[in-house]
Image (spheres, rainbow, N blue to C red):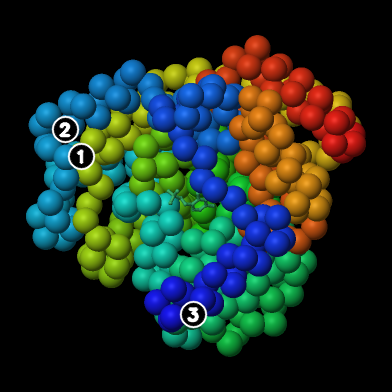
Amino acid sequence: MSIHELPYLKDKVNELKEEGVYRKLPVNTGACDAVVDFEGKKVINLSSNNYLGLANHPRTKKAAIEAVEKYGVGAGAVRTIVGNMDIHEKLERVLAEFKREEAVMVFQSGFNCNAGTIQAITGKGDLIISDELNHASIIDGVRLSRADRAVFRHSDMSHLEEILKEKRDQYNNILIITDGVFSMDGDIAKLPEIVELAEQYNAMTYVDDAHGSGVLGESGRGTVDHFGLHGKVDFIIGTLSKAIGVVGGYVAGKQVMKDWLLHRGRPILFSTALPPAAVGAIIESVTMLMESTEYTDRLWDNAKYFKEKVSKLGFDIGHSETPITPVIIGNEAKTVEFSKRLLDNGVFVSAIVFPTVAKGTGRIRCMITADHTKEQLDEAINTIERVGKEMELI
Ligand SMILES: *Cc1c(COP(=O)(O)O)cnc(C)c1O
């Protein structure tokens, strides 16, 4: 076979097929709502991160259109050249107010916020200590840093302390990084304990709150607000792509952090600023959250309803504390099969398998949103029960 046919990749793809984990991308032909249209077939959507239903809300859409009318569709350059518009500045002010922090630096996505921030704030002679279940973008960000790294067992505070005790004296700065809400299990980081240990050992803390922003805390202000830890977490990362409903990422914290990132945050220096439509829509989303708790109230009401019912059916829903509801099946192929059969029966829940989660812990991950009606949730629960019984999972 010619090298141009990429035989080594063909072999790898064939392996995926043999393992039963090869999948084609589903195609949504409309907006990301509680019900989506998969090429003519309407299915209940239990897979999106659009927690609050803001991705297709009349107010956010209107704000996006108005921003396009005034600013066009592209920022035209990186922010440090000519891509910095007054709406980017406004967005950062609004987000800082929402997060109750001194300053916010916005990035083009949550992923590149982690990739760009971690390497900019750490260096040779520093140590990064990271929870083993942290998001892939944190792992990549850590890889880009010249600091040394250590990993602590998931939410295991005695392991974290062991590392701190052993390594503290060997390094200049120590940065402890954790997800705020762990995306595959829905559990919340033990932030008060982490902050206490950090203070005890003179370390800094970094929380990636992608699944906590718009979900936890007062009107979705996040995990730091949920625990009342304002001023004690040094770097608070959020995404604008999930509950906020648009795209982008940010880090909230001290003004001096922002000053530094403006000079050394590589995605700020080398990647074009967020498009005006996205910025306009995000400002509107955050404004809506500051005006009312109705979105987060509805999200939590729906999540509690769904979790209680699915758990009562006899499924293992792990130890989630948030609207993320894993239904743990175990075997990878069975998990993929379960998800496929649910889709055939009108419910879209994606299968999450190795390497996204550990081998043998395959699950369908149900994402409950404020947008679901109780009727839609009931229909989904009934289908999960029926297919689960057919496959002898319950
Ligand atoms: C989704 C996610 C990201 C990436 O955010 P995007 O804005 O989608 O790039 C980063 N960290 C965590 C923990 C996430 O769940």
Viewed as shown, does residue 111 lie left or right of 97?
right
Mark sitting on residue 1 = 3
Which amino acid type corresponds to the residue marked 2 in the rendered image? Val
The image quadrant of residue 132 is: bottom right
Of callouts 3 and 2, the N-terminal one:
3
Please state the horizontal and vertical placement of residue 162, each as a whole percent of the image: 74, 74
- Depicted 249 relative to depicted 315: above or below: below
- Residue at image location 74% in from the left, 39% down from the top: 338
Q: Secondary structure at mark 2?
A: helix
Viewed as shown, does residue 303 lie left or right of 296?
right
Viewed as shown, does residue 44 lie left or right of 141?
right
Cβ–Cβ below 8 Å for labels 1 and 3? no
Q: Secondary structure at mark 3?
A: loop
The image quadrant of residue 116 is: bottom left
Residue lying furthest top: 375
Mark sitting on residue 276 = 1
Which residue position is annotated with label 2? Answer: 68
Q: CA distance from mark 3 to mark 2?
A: 49 Å
Q: CA distance from mark 1 to mark 2?
A: 6 Å
Which amino acid type corresponds to the residue marked 3 in the rendered image? Met
Of callouts 1 and 2, the N-terminal one:
2
Q: CA distance from mark 1 to mark 3?
A: 47 Å
The residue nearer to you, when weighing 238 against 169, is 238
Please state the horizontal and vertical placement of residue 52, each as a whole percent of the image: 49, 27
Q: How many marks?
A: 3
Which amino acid type corresponds to the residue marked 1 in the rendered image? Pro
Cβ–Cβ below 8 Å for labels 1 and 2? yes
Mark sitting on residue 59 = none
Graded by Cα atoms within 10 Å as few (under 14), some (14 to 19) or many (20 or more), the crowding at tag 1 reads: many
